[in-house]
């Protein structure tokens, strides 16, 4: 079932989303060579809890895996998503790192991701970040009433393909709000005019995951990597479908 949120529910989502947006901005100032993903995770936990919210990913369960241990998903370089924070993962100059974070406050969830440059990064990495960020912008722009989920998917996937990159297989966006993951699934490629029709009050987490070299992924427990070891980037926002332009709830200072 796809839930359309009431004005009161949307206001609660704005609060949880604001926490996420502010956290992503704070993390931008911490990303530097020599910092461990463990340190970033510890900061994120304290940031969220201090605002009366709860980390949405920490303790999340799926069949066959131990509960997810982190507040953040930290996925450097060839990591696509669901990377586990670790004291052994130390950021280096030239790395990129995808950070995905969710929070729940007063029963309502928000979810967002951003890929950061660590120091000076190669031109190919910079372009990957630009293309993935633009793919998210295009996906969000397609989320208007009367259109369909496939229009979002097509906007993302066709642009990524035109740029010579690949969307990661079988990793999708989703509805969000009362639960971290709600219907509908939002694939990052697809045909326009297909899938559920978009209506005002829907709340969606749109999240292109884009690889340089291949669409194929390699799983290692929770973590997903590119099958060929090439770089991957991930951007995500929680949005509301409105009568006008989509409202981006997890807005940050430096990204749309």
Image (cartoon, rainbow, N blue to C red):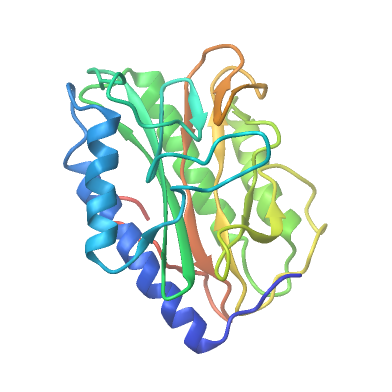
* Quarter of the image with the C terminus in it: bottom left
Q: Position of residue 34 (x, y in %)?
A: 17, 21
Going by the picture, which residue comes out furthest to the top?
228
* Quarter of the image with the N terminus in it: bottom right
Q: Note whether 208 is above or below 81 in the view shown.
A: below
Q: Is residue 209 left or right of residue 115?
A: right
Q: Note whether 231 is above or below 130 in the view shown.
A: above
Going by the picture, which residue comes out furthest to the right?
194
Determine the residue positioned at 27% across, 60% down. 49
Determine the residue positioned at 57% across, 20% down. 226
Q: Quadrant of residue 47?
A: bottom left
Q: Quadrant of residue 175?
A: bottom right
Q: Nearer the viewer, residue 82 or 159?
A: 82
Q: Note whether 20 is above or below 36 in the view shown.
A: below
Q: Nearer the viewer, residue 69 or 104?
A: 69
Q: Does any portion of residue 253 appear in the rendered image?
A: no
Q: Position of residue 157 (x, y in %)?
A: 66, 40
Determine the residue positioned at 67% across, 34% down. 64
Q: Does any portion of residue 142 appear in the rendered image?
A: yes
Determine the residue positioned at 72% across, 70% down. 2
Q: Position of residue 8 (x, y in %)?
A: 48, 88
Q: Nearer the viewer, residue 209 or 158?
A: 209
Q: Nearer the viewer, residue 175 or 137?
A: 175
Q: Is residue 104 left or right of residue 43?
A: right
Q: Position of residue 150 (x, y in %)?
A: 75, 54
Q: Is residue 186 left or right of residue 195?
A: left
């Amino acid at each position: 079932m796809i839930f359309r949120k009431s004005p009161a529910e949307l206001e609660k989502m704005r609060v949880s989303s604001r926490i996420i947006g502010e956290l992503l901005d704070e993390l931008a100032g911490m990303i530097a060579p020599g910092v461990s993903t463990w340190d970033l995770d510890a900061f994120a936990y304290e940031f969220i809890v201090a605002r009366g919210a709860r980390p949405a990913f920490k303790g999340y369960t799926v069949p066959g895996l131990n509960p997810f241990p982190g507040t953040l998903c930290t996925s450097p370089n060839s990591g696509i998503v669901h990377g586990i924070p670790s004291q052994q993962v130390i950021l280096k100059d030239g790395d990129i790192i995808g950070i995905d974070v969710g929070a729940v406050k007063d029963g309502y969830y928000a979810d967002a991701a951003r890929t950061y440059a660590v120091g000076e990064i190669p031109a190919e990495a910079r372009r990957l970040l630009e293309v993935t960020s633009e793919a998210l912008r295009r996906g969000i722009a397609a989320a208007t009433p009367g259109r369909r989920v496939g229009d979002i998917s097509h906007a993302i996937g066709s642009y990524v393909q035109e740029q010579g990159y690949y969307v990661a297989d079988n990793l999708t966006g989703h509805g969000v709000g009362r639960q971290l993951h709600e219907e509908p699934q939002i694939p990052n490629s697809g045909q326009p005019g297909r899938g559920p029709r978009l209506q005002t009050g829907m709340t969606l987490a749109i999240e292109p995951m884009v690889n340089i070299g291949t669409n194929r992924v390699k799983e290692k427990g929770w973590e997903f990597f590119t099958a060929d070891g090439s770089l991957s980037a991930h951007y995500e926002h929680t949005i509301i479908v409105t009568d006008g332009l989509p409202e981006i709830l997890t807005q940050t200072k430096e990204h749309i």
